Amino acid sequence: MIEVIRLSKQFGPKLAVDNISFSVAKGEVLGFLGPNGAGKSTTMRMITGFIPPTRGTVTVGGHDIQKSPIQAKAKIGYLPENAPLYSDMTVESFLRFTAELRGITGAAQKTAVNKAIEICFLEKVARQSLDTLSKGFRHRTCLAQSIVHDPEVLILDEPTDGLDPNQKQEVRNLIRRLGATKTVIFSTHILEEVEAVCSRAIIIDQGKVVADGTPDELKRRASCAGAVKVRIRGLAGSGILSELEKLPHAVSVETIESGDSLFVGRVFPKKSAVDGTLAGEIYQFAAGRQLQLQELAVDEGRLDEMFREITVQVRS
Amino acid sequence: MKNIWVVFKREVQAYFLTPLAYVFIFIFLILSMSLCFVFGRFLEGEDASLDYTFFQFHPWLFMVLGPAIGMRLWSEENREGTIELLLTMPISTWQAIIGKFLAACLVLVSALAMTFPVILTVNYLGDPDGGKIFSGYLGSLLVGSASIALTCLVSAFTRSQVICLVVSVVLCFFLVLIGSPQLLEFLRNIPATGLLETLRLAALEIADGFSLMSHGGRLFGGVLRLDTAVFFAAFISFCLYATSVVIRSKRA
């Protein structure tokens, strides 16, 4: 549905986006992650046709955004960063205006606007002027604008920014629901959001794609992924430690607590054994020695850790 | 065409649902009428004509009021970030530019329409030339539209309405001034020979040819000339086209 091919953007001497390629299929919800200034918004602005790329192409639903912008833009719903609005309008008149620009008129327009108002929970403020509304309502009005024409592609730049926790949850649910039938790209700083909503995530740093995969795949790339937390009783801590270090798939062991007949720690696996092999070995070791295995937990990895490792790595 | 209409409608709402248009119309009426009756000596002149009593002041008024209407056109979009919404809609940039320009012109047309009592008055007092009054209004409208078009161009450069207003007023002032009778008179009377003479004539041509005052003045006097029509059409089209170039290059 969206094809991004070798996209670059140069702002003066700064290369904001550096040779990015990816594609997003229908029914996919792609999370766009990256530190501030990584090039997320610039990439989204190029996909929506707001700024022209220095090099590379973007096609949306088969239409090149540069060569046939009108057709491509017609397929996109876009929520820009900071959710800009015409403050002199009311929620309803603003949505009618955007629907009309999208070529929706008459009775269909009324239906479309009402539906967008309902989906984004704006009924209470529909007739209020936009400059009297709180940030959450303004944000959702802009979101309503992006879905009023039921687009095939949704590009959302930080859709949950500035919302309270309940509103964040509502927007996440909305994205997940829309994602089933549309193609969605959204950017965020919030990593749990990626886990909750995305079917795939791309991490951008310094204008480059540094990671691309499902949230689970990405989590497994964190250094803590596959580490096994254990709590074993029945032998001196130092003794257990040395035994654990000898396990075939263990690389290193970190001690958290060590006592006369207690060991609590974390066992890190070899790269090839993040799938639970190590946990099995630990269990067999404990069972064979008649030790009491009180805790055995495989860390599935954390996105924030992976994110920090990957983006710091690129910098150094 | 439809997209121009949609943008036009929104901009007209922005002008008329806020005090903006009414303030403008009110100020225009106060100024144009007081200039007409006080400085234009409309009553004392005992001449059934609106040429030098009424229209003659309009270029000076539009020099300030044109930028006052047009200053929000793109600077507001730049400041609020709504330009990102507008230009990612399935419409062309030029459609948005023309829609906005026409909406600003509608404010101008309303203001001019509200001066109708002066037509009634002059008809009551004497027997004026209707064609001349028509061409005077046309001239006034074109001078005003030209200053709005220029302001539209300036507003594309900035996110500050104040900067846009100041720069546009200065530019409009210049365009009005170079065609003022005093300046043209001065240029005509410089004693010069040879190359200087050529330069003097060229300056005179340029001043006369580019001035909103000269071209407007012809229409106020009831003279409809092809070069006047071409001047206004070219001037406005150039400004609007340049606006699209600025908008595009600012994002590149």
Image: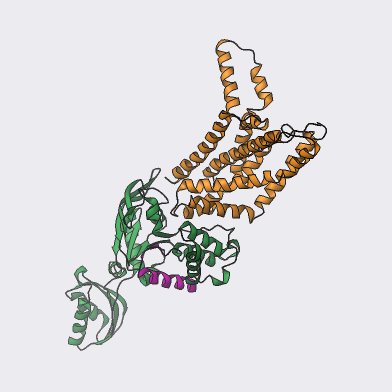
Chain colours: A green, B orange
> Residue A284: image x %, image y %?
18, 83
The image shows residue A149, relative to residue B155, as above or below, that is below
Q: Toward the viewer: A285 or A134?
A: A134
Q: Toward the viewer: A273 or A268?
A: A273
Residue A3's quadrant in the figure? Answer: bottom left
Residue at x 38% of width, y 67% of height: A191
Q: Which residues are magenta?
A: A161-190
- Horizontal relation, residue B134 to residue B90: left or right: right
The image shows residue A153, relative to residue B40, as above or below, that is below
> Residue A122: image x %, image y %?
53, 70
Q: Is residue B19 magenta?
A: no
Residue found farthest to the right: B44
Residue at x 51% of width, y 41% of height: B240
- Horizontal relation, residue B124 to residue A146: left or right: right
Residue at x 40% of width, y 59% of height: A76
Can residue A43 be seen here? Answer: no
Can residue B91 be seen here? Answer: yes
Residue found farthest to the top: B194
> Residue A239: image x %, image y %?
23, 80
Please give the count of numbered marks on the rendered protein: 0
